[in-house]
Image: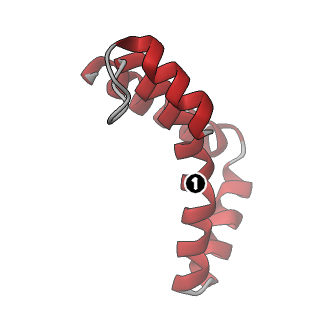
Amino acid sequence: MVRSLLIGAGLMLVLEGLLPLFLPARWKAMLSRIVMRLDGQIRFSGLVLIAPGLFLLLPLLLVHDGSWPGAGAGVGASVVSCKIWF
């Protein structure tokens, strides 16, 4: 689990670093527009980014562990639960 988190964090840092590395002027312009937004707008943007990310990650994490709360024993039960749930 820790290895997966470190891989995910590393990939996130690599992807986040691409824009300032290759397009620094656009990156600065984007940051200046973000600074001018209201806090509520920034929070909504964060929600819009988090929701699909959780939607994609949750089934992968649950099937990988083989543990869906109340799903019974084994990976097969988790897969069935994920198919019913989503």
Q: Image check: 15 left or right of 11?
A: right
Residue hosting label 1: 51
- The foreground one among 47 and 22 is 47
* 50, 28: nearer the viewer: 50
Residue found at x 59% / y 73%? 44
Q: Residue 41: horizontal and vertical position, in percent?
A: 61, 80
Percent position of residue 61, x then y = 43, 27
Q: Residue drawn 30% across and 18% down?
A: 3
Q: Residue 46 sits in which quadrant? A: bottom right
Q: Residue at x 66, y 55 (%)?
A: 27
Instruction: Pick whichever, 56 or 71, lies toward us.
Output: 71
Looking at the picture, the colour scheme in use is secondary structure
Which amino acid, by three-letter code, is at mark 1? Ala
Q: Position of residue 86 (x, y in %)?
A: 63, 39
Is 77 situated left or right of 24 in this image? left
Residue 1, above or below 27: above
- How many numbered marks are there? 1
Which residue sits at x=45%, y=23%? Answer: 78
Is 6 rendered above or below residue 36? Answer: above
* Quarter of the view holding residue 1: top left
